[in-house]
Image (spheres, rainbow, N blue to C red):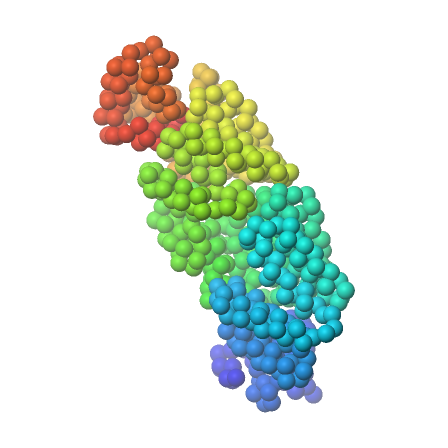
């Protein structure tokens, strides 16, 4: 192993202690950079034995030297084999396979898991390593949708951990059980299992590696089911943990991503961008997933602010690092007026995604985009699915997401009275959890419902309230839409549409046929066709779908 370069900080000398003794002291104090350098020096003086090789590998990982982590852990594996310590060799093989799996190197990972299984065939006594090798089995079954079988395997792993006194294994398995229950819609029991995991995390019972993994996975799971209070609580705890170890690299990036997500929801957009930028800076070359998520979060805020070029760059960077940039990119295309491109993208992603929790996060964008394209029937079907998924949760926010989508669909179908009831329910939740942008977006829809019912004063009050939030946040696209709505009939007057043409366009955008429009307005079908022709000419459009998208964008539905 090479000597640390002159630019690297050398550990301070402690009288009477050699490099190896100092390195163990640094390691116990979680001074990772010092521990790494002292262990490296000790290894140069005399090759380390297996336990110290494990320490060196972990110190290398925690200071961001991922390849060296894998090489040194493989050395530890071989050292344990030579010392006939089979179980410890198996554990090294497990962590090698686990890390390779996270890096996307599935073949090598499977090879290490297979070697670990083969070695355990020669181990007669019960050991925690048998439980560790169940963890990837759980993930495979969970991915395939075999929830009960996955839960049973996780329970077996936890039992191994309890019998062998291995807190890391128990926490890892319990958290898997919690995630499985969330996937099944059993949110209360799932969150209880995750809470139990976090007791072990926050009381310092776990190793640094498992502590970081549990923080990241549990926070992500809480956000998937909109358990936002827990996500905030655990993110604050993760931030404190990371700050107490400033030399630690791997988990610092994802911590900043989670902080950015929470800041965006709370309306602290500049701070959210800064946190996402820090995430990218801390994780590039170390954690591709955290880097990708950091770019995606930056893109999301840029999109909402109308900084479309920066948003485009952020989504492309996220994709480069392996993250699907949807639904954000599709929403960007919609904001740019490229509704056909947005529809194609969101349909592709939605058709391929089968995971219920991931569909929960996709469907609101799907409904917004499909409504803008004028396919109210498809939007209604997607809304039913969203309500079914949200109905299995009891965290409040999923219901707000679902009823907001329902209100938008009801508004597009011309049922403004029903829409008001749905939208007010959503607004109460967004206001309660202090999510200003989401609340302002709902108020725009409430204003449109008031207008459809003839209450122009009520509509303007809602638009004014929303405007004040959008101005504070710098949400330029939403401000532009508010400007188009405050003229009474949206921006139709600037396009010289007559009142009758506006009426026809609204009904067509709601999915009505020419015959139905004619009946509702007491006109002949021929007259409706003439109005449509005039609308297409004035708006420079050629299809009913394009006219519907225009009407939705300019607040006519």
User: How many numbered callouts?
Assistant: 0
Q: Is residue 511 above or below residue 211?
A: above
- Residue 118 location, x and y as percent? 61, 73
Q: Quadrant of residue 337?
A: top left
Residue lying at the far bottom in this picture: please name it. Answer: 45
Residue 421 seen in the current view: yes
Could you tell me residue 324's position as x and y percent?
Answer: 44, 52
- As rendered, which of 292 and 240 lies closer to the eye? 292
Q: Is residue 480 above or below residue 488?
A: below
Answer yes or no: is residue 431 visible.
Answer: no
| Residue 259 to residue 243: above or below | above
> Where does the image place residue 44, in percent across and percent down from the top left?
56, 87
Left-right relation of 307 to 147: left
Residue 229 vs residue 544: left or right? right
Q: Judge whether 516 appears above or below 244 on screen.
A: above
Q: Nearer the viewer, residue 515 or 225?
A: 515
Q: Residue at x 62, y 38 (%)?
A: 392
Residue at the spot 48% in from the left edge and 46% down from the top edge = 353
Image position, residue 556 (x, y; %): 38, 24
Which of the image's four quarters has the C terminus?
top left
Q: Which of the two residues, 410 or 279, is positioned nearer the viewer here?
A: 410
At x 63%, y 66%, the residue is 133
């Amino acid at each position: 192993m090479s000597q640390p370069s002159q630019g690297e900080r050398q550990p301070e000398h402690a009288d009477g202690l050699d490099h190896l003794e100092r390195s163990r002291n640094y390691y116990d104090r979680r001074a990772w950079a010092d521990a790494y350098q002292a262990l490296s020096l000790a290894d140069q003086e005399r090759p380390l034995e297996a336990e110290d090789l494990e320490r060196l590998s972990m110190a290398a990982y925690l200071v961001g030297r991922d390849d060296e982590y894998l090489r040194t852990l493989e050395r530890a594996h071989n050292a344990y084999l030579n010392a006939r310590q089979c179980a410890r060799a198996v554990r090294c093989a497990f962590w090698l396979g686990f890390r390779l799996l996270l890096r996307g190197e599935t073949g090598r990972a499977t090879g290490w898991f297979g070697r670990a299984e083969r070695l355990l065939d020669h181990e007669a006594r019960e050991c925690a390593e048998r439980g560790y090798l169940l963890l990837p089995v759980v993930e495979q079954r969970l991915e395939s949708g075999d929830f009960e079988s996955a839960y049973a395997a996780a329970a077996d792993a936890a039992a191994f951990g309890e019998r062998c006194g291995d807190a890391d294994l128990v926490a890892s398995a319990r958290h898997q059980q919690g995630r499985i229950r969330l996937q099944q819609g059993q949110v209360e029991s799932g969150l209880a299992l995750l809470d139990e995991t976090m007791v072990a995390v926050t009381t310092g019972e776990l190793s640094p590696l498992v502590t970081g993994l549990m923080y990241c996975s549990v926070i992500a799971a809480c956000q998937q089911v909109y358990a936002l209070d827990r996500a905030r609580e655990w993110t604050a705890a993760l931030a404190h943990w990371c700050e107490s170890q400033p030399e630690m690299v791997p988990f610092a990036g994802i911590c900043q991503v989670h902080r950015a997500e929470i800041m965006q929801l709370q309306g602290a957009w500049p701070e959210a961008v800064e946190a996402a930028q820090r995430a990218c800076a801390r994780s590039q070359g170390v954690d591709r997933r955290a880097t990708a998520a950091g770019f995606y979060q930056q893109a999301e805020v840029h999109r909402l602010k109308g900084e479309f070029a920066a948003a485009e760059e952020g989504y492309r960077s996220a994709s480069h690092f392996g993250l699907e940039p949807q639904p954000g990119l599709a929403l960007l295309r919609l904001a740019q007026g490229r509704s056909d491109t947005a529809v194609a993208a969101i349909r592709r992603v939605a058709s391929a995604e089968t995971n219920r929790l991931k569909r929960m996060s996709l469907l609101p964008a799907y409904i917004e985009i499909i409504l803008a394209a004028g396919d109210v029937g498809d939007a209604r079907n997607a809304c039913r699915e969203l309500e079914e998924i949200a109905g299995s949760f009891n965290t409040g926010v999923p219901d707000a997401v679902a009823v907001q989508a329902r209100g938008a669909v009801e508004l597009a179908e011309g049922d403004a009275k029903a829409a008001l009831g749905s939208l007010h329910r959503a607004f109460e939740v967004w206001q309660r959890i202090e999510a200003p942008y989401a609340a302002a977006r709902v108020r725009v829809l409430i204003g449109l419902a008031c207008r459809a019912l003839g209450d122009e004063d009520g509509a303007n009050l809602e638009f004014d309230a929303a405007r004040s939030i959008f101005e504070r946040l710098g949400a330029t696209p939403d401000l532009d839409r508010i400007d188009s709505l405050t003229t009474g009939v949206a921006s139709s007057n600037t396009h010289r549409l007559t009142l009758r043409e506006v009426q026809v366009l609204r009904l067509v955008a709601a999915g009505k046929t020419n015959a139905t429009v004619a009946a509702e307005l007491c006109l002949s079908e021929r007259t409706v066709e003439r109005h449509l022709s005039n609308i297409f000419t004035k708006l420079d459009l050629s299809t009913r779908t394009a006219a519907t998208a225009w009407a939705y964008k300019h607040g006519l539905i």
